[in-house]
Amino acid sequence: MRTRLAIKIHSFLENRFPERRVFLKSDSDTRFVRLRPETQLIAISGIVLFVAWAIVATAIILMDSIGAGNFREQAKRDQITYRARLNAISTERDTRAEEALAAQERFNAALAQISIMQSELLTSETRRQELETGIEVIQTTLRQTMTQRDSTRIALEELRANTDAEGATHQAAAASPLQMDFLSTVLSDTAQERDQIQADAKEALDQRAEMELELELLNERNDQIFRQLEEAVAVSVTPLDKMFRSAGMPPDRILEQVRRGYSGQGGPLSPLALSTRGEEPSADELRANQILNQLDQLNLYRMAAQQAPFATPVNLGLVRQTSGFGYRRDPKTGGRRLHKGSDFAGRTGTDIYATADGVVTHAGWQSGYGKLVTIQHAFGIETKYAHNSNLRVKVGQRVSRGDHIADMGNTGRSTGTHLHYEVRVNGNPVNPMIYIKAARNVF
């Protein structure tokens, strides 16, 4: 039996949706389909739901289209900004490369100038010693001449006294003509000798004045050479000293290690001049020896720079840096981890170079790194070159800065072709860009 509520609902639906019949006529028969109120309600509800769904779906599609357009526009703007940033970085890189080349040319010119000035300084020092020796000889000759002049003057006075005495005797005793002739000859010879001594003394004084003037000019020339040498050495040493300090390498300790390591190859430059009589060195000797010490320091800096990773492992004009040193999100696990080096992306097979002199301690496959080259350098520094496609060195091989050691690849735990470059000091990873940026204005 129907309940009272069902009867009321049916009555309500009959008022709103009266029963309808749909006739289906054919050539031989006519049929109809009864559409009860409940059936009409269900059909109308389905149509309403379908229309509502179509409206909502259309709205969602339109909103997605609008949003996708905005996203594409934003992506285009980001791409333009990224390209502009890449162009700016490329321009800055080219500028830095030109500055580094200019600094290298200035450095080479300063070294050539130092070599020329050192030769001139040695020549001037030799000439100065010769002039000092000549002046000493002239002074000795002048002293001997003055001594002879004084002796001759005393002899002349004595001879005059004897002549006066003999003249009195001649007047008294009428000396013979032969004695008078002898006395006249002696007086004449003495007078000529005196005049010659005076002329020699004057000539010696003139030569001394000329040599003193030449010595003064030579001292001025030496002072100019010293100043130029000091300036050239300062221009060469200061950037190197700044480079090591910027890289966190104390110059005093580094130079001492290099000096100990090369003690069997001659050591520092020898002093320019040393006194054999226990005298204090002159100001020029002290100045020259200070310049020689600075040249020795410059040479030690040069050897130390060859053994520290100040060079770049790739040609920066052919690659771009995609990741730096520090903590970052792992693209595979999603967690944070320490990225122990710098990544440089480029074409497969791009040349990879050793950044400093050293010995290859690993050349082969290593988990995570793929094909890896590890080089041990001086000062407890080690460099790693990972994800290579081809290795060009073997364990135990000694390499120099700039040697071609591998080709760029995508081996190991890698998401694309790139070089993973690490620098470790006493086993601890450090930022490789510290060394590369420190050397930008030097090499």
Image (cartoon, rainbow, N blue to C red):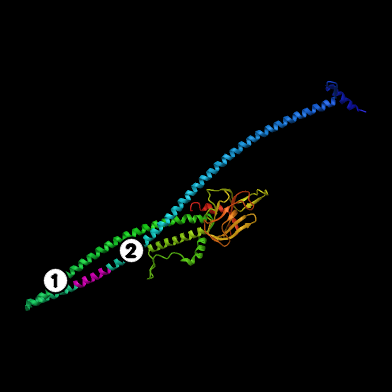
Q: Nearer the viewer, residue 126 or 64?
A: 64
Q: Residue 262 got which mark? A: none
Q: Is residue 269 left or right of residue 367?
A: left
Residue ID at (20%, 66%): 199
Q: Nearer the viewer, residue 316 or 78?
A: 316
Q: Is residue 326 visible?
A: yes
Magenta residues span 139-153
Quarter residue 206 falls in? bottom left
Q: Quadrant of the N terminus?
A: top right
Residue ID at (49%, 55%): 242
Q: Would you place residue 173 above or below residue 311 in this image?
A: below
Quarter residue 227 falls in? bottom left
Residue ID at (54%, 41%): 84
Q: Amino acid at mark 2?
A: Arg
The residue that mark 2 highlights is 127
Q: Nearer the viewer, residue 258 or 372?
A: 372
Nearer to us: label 2 or label 1: 2
Q: Would you place residue 354 above or below residue 205 in this image?
A: above
Callouts 2 and 1 close, C-beta under 8 Å? no
Q: Residue 188 got which mark? A: 1
Whichever of callouts 2 and 1 sits on the residue coming sooner in the sequence is 2
Total numbered circles: 2
Residue 122, x across and y down, in percent? 37, 62
Q: Amino acid at mark 1?
A: Ser
Main secondary structure along the magenta-highlighted residues: helix
Q: Is residue 19 visible?
A: no
Residue 14, x across and y down, in percent? 85, 23
Outermost residue toward the front in this view? 28
